[in-house]
Amino acid sequence: MTAVKQWIAFFLLMLAGSTALASTPLMTLVLPDGQVRVLDEAALDGLPQTEFTTTTPWTQGTHHYRGPTLAAVLAAQGIRDARKIAVSALNGYQQVVDLALFDGVPLTLVRQQDGKLLTRRNKGPLWLLISFTTYPELDVADIHNCMVWQITRIEIVD
């Protein structure tokens, strides 16, 4: 190989390597003051993770889920007193969630089901979820509506 070809091959190898290391954006978080934060895999994986096993109305059987709590995600942005959020999904579905309904309940941005990352085919990459097995009193339609999957955006509205 000529020196130019070697340099081009090296450059392409470095470019491919840096692309592979880049973290994928997963969702947008809009803060109360209008600031926008793009949260990627690294930001969410760097937070404390919650795990629980539960059944859901949308899946068959019992599954194990893992991800950061919504409280941890908001706290990492300096938000400790949000009362309502608007959660938007990939398909345009939007739900305003009154966080008072989940007082003392770890509302989780699930990233994994049974040890595997969620994909768009199985409600990912992010699914707002609680353990219905632990909190059976919350296994009702009004709460089900808050369990948004394929999340693309969360806006703090109050």
Image (cartoon, rainbow, N blue to C red):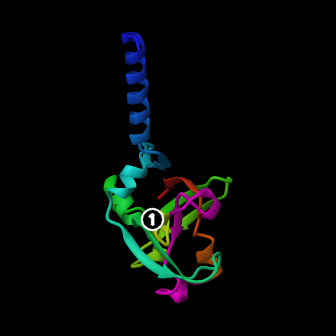
Stretch of the chain drawn in magenta: 117-139
On whether residue 131 falls in the magenta region, the answer is yes
Residue located 46% across and 76% down the image: 102
Q: Please say if 149 is above or below 33.
A: below
Residue 20 location, x and y as percent?
43, 40
In the rendered image, which residue does mark 1 sit on?
83
Q: Residues within 10 Å of mark 1 (few under 14, many from 20)?
A: few
In the foreground, 123 or 137: 123
Can you tell which quarter of the image residue 97 is in? bottom right
**Kind of residue sitting beneath label 1:** Arg
Residue 108, quarter of the rendered image: bottom left
Give SS at disc 1: loop
Give the residue displayed 59% in from the left and 79% down from the top: 56
Number of marks in the image?
A: 1
| Residue 17 x/y as whole percent | 40, 35
Q: Is residue 50 above or below residue 53?
A: above
